[in-house]
Amino acid sequence: MKTRRKFTPDLKSEVVLQLLSGERSMAELCRTHQVTSQMIGNWKQQFLVAARRAFERDADGSAEQERIAELERMVGKLTMQLEIAKKVSTWRDGTPTGNGR
């Protein structure tokens, strides 16, 4: 009983890139790696679907980055408000400020 060969993602992507770039033909790749054209066709399809997802993540990532930036602005604003409130409370209490005057 034959065991199934397993191909690494690096090999699959290299084969697909060679095919898409026109560096090598489908027949050459099939002979070199001893696989069928159907298998390389499946790899190509998986590669193209994954490439689309890579660009979709950019849109999701930019929304996340925008949210993070908004939250950082809010934290900065709240930190400034807290510092101002601390200074005002020390003036009202009549206690000396942090610089000793």
Image (cartoon, helix red, strand yellow):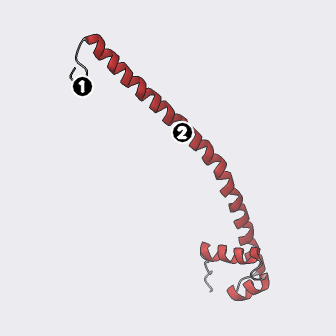
> Is 3 placed above or below 53 here?
below
Residue 96, image x, y percentages: 22, 18
The residue lying at 28 percent from left, 16 percent from top is: 90
Q: CA distance from mark 1 to mark 2?
A: 34 Å
| Amino acid under disc 1 | Asn
Left or right of residue 18: residue 9 = left
Label 1 neighbourhood size at 10 Å, few (<14), some (14-19), many (20+)? few
The residue lying at 68 percent from left, 52 percent from top is: 56
Q: Quadrant of the C terminus?
A: top left
Left or right of residue 62: residue 22 = right
Taking depth in this image into account, of 81 and 52 the one nearest to the observer is 81
Q: Are marks 1 and 2 in contact (CB under 8 Å)?
A: no
Q: Label 1's element?
A: loop
The residue lying at 37 percent from left, 19 percent from top is: 85
Q: Label 2's element?
A: helix
In the rendered image, which quarter is residue 42 located in?
A: bottom right
| Amino acid under disc 2 | Ala
Left or right of residue 95: residue 62 = right
The residue lying at 33 percent from left, 21 percent from top is: 86
> Is 47 placed above or below 62 here?
below
Q: According to the image, label 1 marks what residue?
A: 99
Left or right of residue 72: residue 49 = right
Tell me, for residue 21, which label it has, or none. none
Q: Quadrant of the N terminus?
A: bottom right
Tell me, for residue 69, which label it has, or none. 2
User: Which numbered disc, 1 or 2, marks the residue that appears first in the sequence?
Assistant: 2
Residue 15, image x, y percentages: 69, 78
In the rendered image, which quarter is residue 41 located in?
A: bottom right
